[in-house]
Image (spheres, helix red, strand yellow):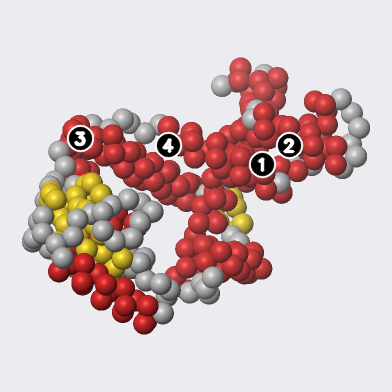
C-alpha cells in the first residue's frame, strides 16, 4: 500500500483513465438523447398528412404521426452515434456540397471535416433520409431466414388470398346503344331481346373492341373488362345456351357460357414464392419494430 502511495505517476495515470472513462460515459449519455417534436413541427406533420390524404387528421392519426417521428429521430440519432455519417459516400458528397454552398474554401477532405464540425448533417433532410434508409437496411438484414414451419404458418393464416377464384369461358353478342340516353339503351335492349329469340351465333350483333370470346375470366376480370352486371355471370348455372341481355358499361350482351371452373384452394408449393415474400415483409416490420423498441428503452426523449 505504501509503495502505491509513493508512486505519483501511477496516480496521475489512474486519474487520467477515470477522467477519460467519465468523459466517454457523459458523451455516450448525451448521444442517447433526442428532442420530441415541437408543437410547430407536429402541426407541419399533420398539415402534410392532411394534404396527401385530402382529409383532416383525427387524434389517432396525429398520435401515430408523432410516434413515427420520434421513431425516426431515435433511428437517426443511433445512426449518428454509430458514426455512419462519417463513412457513407452519399452523406460525404452531400456534406461537400453543403460546404461549397456556404462558401468554405479548402481541400475537399477539410471541407467535409468542417461541415461535420458545424454539424450540417443534423439539419440536412437528404442526409437524414439516407441514414434512415441505411439503418433500416442494416437492422432488417440481421434477421434469421424463414423456417419451413414459419412459411407454412403464414400460408395457413392467409390461405384465402391464394385461393384460385372461380372462372368462366364464354362467347358474347354485343349490342351497342346509339348514345348514352335512357331511350337509346332501352332500344338497344329491345334489339338484344329480338336477337335472343332468333337463336343467334357469336357473329351477330355489333363489333366489340375486346373480341367476342373470353377465356378463364374471374369476377375481378369481368368487372375490370366489362363492369355492370357481368360479374354476376359466375352465379349463372346455364352453359352453352344464350342468356341475357346482360348490361355492361358499354351496352347489352347476350352470353353463351362455354365452361366453368370452380374456385379451388392453392397448394403451398404453387405459391411458395408469394408466401416467402409475405413472410419477408412481415419479418422486416417485426424486426424493425423490435429494434426501435430497444432504442426507446436506451434513449431519453426530451419533451
CA–CA distance in space, label 1 to label 2: 7 Å
> In this rendering, would 156 be left or right of 281?
left
- Looking at the image, which residue is at 64% across and 23% down? 5
Residue 301's quadrant in the figure? Answer: bottom right
CA–CA distance in space, label 2 to label 3: 46 Å
From this viewpoint, is residue 264 visible? Answer: yes
Q: In this view, does 206 lie above or below 284?
A: below
Q: Is residue 118 above or below residue 257?
A: above
Dot 3 corresponds to which residue?
Answer: 270
CA–CA distance in space, label 1 to label 3: 43 Å
Q: Residues within 10 Å of mark 1 (few under 14, many from 20)?
A: many
Q: Position of residue 207 (x, y in %)?
A: 35, 56
Q: Earlier in the sequence, mark 1 or mark 2?
A: 2
Using the image as rendered, state which of residue 204 and residue 185 is in the foreground.
204
Residue 233's quadrant in the figure? Answer: bottom left
Callout 4–callout 1 Cβ contact below 8 Å: no
- The label on residue 127 is 1
Q: Which residue lies most toward the bottom here?
A: 183
- The label on residue 94 is 2
Amino acid at each position: 500500500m505504501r509503495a502505491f502511495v509513493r508512486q505519483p505517476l501511477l496516480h496521475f495515470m489512474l486519474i487520467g483513465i477515470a477522467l477519460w472513462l467519465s468523459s466517454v460515459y457523459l458523451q455516450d449519455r448525451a448521444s442517447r438523447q433526442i428532442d420530441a417534436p415541437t408543437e410547430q413541427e407536429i402541426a407541419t406533420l399533420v398539415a402534410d398528412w392532411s394534404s396527401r390524404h385530402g382529409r383532416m387528421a383525427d387524434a389517432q392519426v396525429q398520435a401515430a404521426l408523432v410516434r413515427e417521428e420520434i421513431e425516426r429521430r431515435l433511428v437517426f440519432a443511433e445512426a449518428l452515434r454509430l458514426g455512419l455519417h462519417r463513412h457513407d459516400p452519399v452523406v460525404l458528397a452531400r456534406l461537400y456540397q453543403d460546404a461549397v454552398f456556404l462558401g468554405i474554401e479548402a481541400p475537399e477532405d477539410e471541407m467535409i471535416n468542417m461541415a461535420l464540425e458545424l454539424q450540417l448533417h443534423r439539419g440536412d433532410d437528404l442526409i437524414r433520409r439516407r441514414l434512415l434508409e441505411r439503418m433500416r437496411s442494416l437492422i432488417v438484414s440481421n434477421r434469421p431466414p424463414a423456417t419451413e414451419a414459419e412459411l407454412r404458418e403464414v400460408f395457413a393464416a392467409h390461405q384465402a388470398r391464394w385461393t384460385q377464384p372461380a372462372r368462366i369461358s364464354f362467347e358474347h353478342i354485343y349490342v351497342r346503344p346509339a348514345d348514352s340516353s335512357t331511350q337509346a339503351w332501352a332500344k338497344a335492349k329491345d334489339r338484344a331481346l329480338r336477337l335472343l329469340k332468333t337463336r343467334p351465333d357469336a357473329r351477330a350483333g355489333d363489333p366489340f373492341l375486346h373480341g367476342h370470346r373470353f377465356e378463364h375470366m374471374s369476377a375481378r376480370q369481368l368487372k375490370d373488362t366489362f363492369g355492370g352486371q357481368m360479374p354476376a355471370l359466375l352465379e349463372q348455372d346455364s352453359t352453352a345456351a344464350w342468356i341475357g341481355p346482360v348490361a355492361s358499361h358499354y351496352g347489352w350482351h347476350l352470353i353463351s357460357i362455354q365452361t366453368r371452373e370452380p374456385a379451388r384452394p392453392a397448394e403451398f408449393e404453387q405459391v411458395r414464392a408469394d408466401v416467402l415474400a409475405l413472410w419477408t415483409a412481415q419479418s422486416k416490420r417485426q424486426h424493425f419494430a423490435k429494434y426501435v423498441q430497444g432504442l426507446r428503452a436506451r434513449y431519453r426523449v426530451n419533451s
